[in-house]
Amino acid sequence: MLKQNLSQKMMQKLSPQQIQLMKLLQIPTATLEQRIKEELESNPALDEGDDGDVFDLNNEEGAFGDEEEKNEEVDFELDDYLKEYIEDDPVSYKLKTDHYSTDDDEKTIPVAVEKSFHEYLIQQLGMRELPTEEDRIVAEQIIGSIDEDGYLRRDTMAIIDDLMFSQNMEVEESKVENAIKMIQTFDPPGVGSRDLQECLISQLNYKLDKGKENNIQEKQLALKVLKNHFEEFTKKHYQRLKKNLFVSESELKDAIDEILKLNPKPASGVAGDSRDSNHYVLPDFIITNRDGELELTLNSRNAPDLRINDQYMDMLVNYRDTTKGRRSTKKEKEAIMFIKQKIDSAKWFIDAIRQRQETLYKTMYAIMQFQFDYFISGDQRRIKPMILKDIAEITGHDISTVSRVANSKFVQTEFGTKKLKQFFSESLMTQDGQEVSTLEVKNILKDIIIEENKRKPLSDEKLKDMLQSKGYNIARRTVAKYREQLNIPVARLRKEL
């Protein structure tokens, strides 16, 4: 049986403008310019340039009502719209105002034109004489399957399936294996290997085959370690290795030193593979020390100034002039509705950019004041415990907003370019009751491990005792957590001969 009833409930929904602002807050300065260009391409009402006749960006107008009410109210609403955006004092918005550093001119980063790693392999393939065109296609397919580290992670049957799907070729497994063996002879040594063990063995064989290298005995012993005792080597079971190989500690150390000279990522040795060398960090904020006074500026270089397109304003003026004393036609209403929609969208985007800049500046200014001692001295021990909630309370923003600002953002200081996330840390109570940042504890932990005897690395329990002797009240499991966050392995894997 159907029943009717009334109910009330509260719901919180985000407007499209709020969603747009949140997305803009997340992106760093390095990608802001691209985002603005995308909006300029998609919205003809949005323009870039200097000051000019533009619309007042401080007022918002909603969309028109239901379809039935449009015919009765459209003329009245358009009159208000025209009056509001044409007769008010024009305002333009520039990204390079207020907190923009005048020293930052528009600059571009030169990028070297180099051959990629895969192009380097294809070039070597072109120097080989292959029996048939099919063999060349198979080899090119294998080269395309090699990852950015230089490894061939796909098995033979998967490559055969790829050739069937992409080239409509049915090849034998032996042909693919022969092509793989050929590519494994390419430069750099180790390329096309299936795993780390095969990669290291290939490089060591290459050195031995050259015949001009010194330390032949050490390399031969290293080859035995890699071929027959790879698991013991990776787990650093040195005593077991000495026993199984019947060698002294010094002989084993020389062999392991030869292995450590090898490249576990062969593709990184190719000059043309510049994915790391061309990775630049563009800071979002710049902090300058002016005789003890910190000055914060937003880095908005290369981002264009935004305004409303003059042509769209002229269209509204012409519409107002041509429709005086008469009722608008249906086509005129549709055209002006389209223009209004595009102008509103441009207004919302410009306003979102403005709010982004203001939110970024306000949040970074709060962080700068909170960590004032560090930005003056550069001493990491003076970084205070600071969590997202602390900055949220200072700025009045939500914690999620502060998190979006801190995510993937960098600040340039006289002590280097730092990630904003580096300044957020929990507090740890010392034995004398003082609160210190966990960053300080991590740095001390890192220094202790660097200075330890590598023949007898310190266990987490001993590390805990040493930190407690320095006055830090810390548990062993916390030491293990900090060690993992610092990407430091356990004591057994830090052992050296």
Image (cartoon, rainbow, N blue to C red):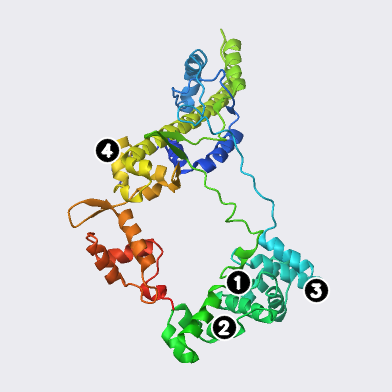
Q: Secondary structure at mark 4?
A: loop
**Residue position for label 2:** 218
For the residue marked with disc 4, what is the amino acid? Gln
Gap between marks 4 and 1 measured at Cα:
58 Å
Say if mark 1 contacts mark 3, CB within 8 Å. no
* Farthest-out residue, top: 325
What is the spatial separation of the Cα atoms under label 3 and label 2, in whole angstroms?
A: 37 Å
CB of mark 4 within 8 Å of CB of mark 3?
no
Query: In the drawing, what numbered circle is on residue 196?
Result: none
Q: Are marks 1 and 2 in contact (CB under 8 Å)?
A: no
Residue 130's label in the rendered image is: 3
**Mark 4 neighbour class, 10 Å CA radius: few under 14, some 14 to 19, many 20 or more:** few
Amino acid residing under circle 2: Glu
Q: Looking at the picture, how far across and down is residue 284, in whole percent?
A: 47, 40
Q: What is the x, y in percent for residue 188?
A: 66, 69
| Foreground: disc 4 or disc 1 | 1
- Which mark is first along the chain, 4 or 2? 4
Nearer the observer, 204 or 3: 204
Q: Nearer the viewer, mark 1 or mark 2?
A: 2
Disc 3 residue type (three-letter): Leu
- Numbered disc 3: secondary structure: loop
Disc 1 and disc 2: Cα gap in Å?
Answer: 33 Å
**The disc labelled 1 sits on which kind of residue?**
Arg
Of the numbered discs 1 and 2, the one sitting upstream in the chain is 1
Q: Judge whether 474 appears above or below 365 on screen.
A: below
Residue 154 disc label = 1
Quarter of image, res 415: top left
The residue beneath circle 4 is: 8
Is disc 2 surrounded by few (<14), some (14 to 19) or many (20+) residues within 10 Å? some
Q: Secondary structure at mark 1?
A: loop
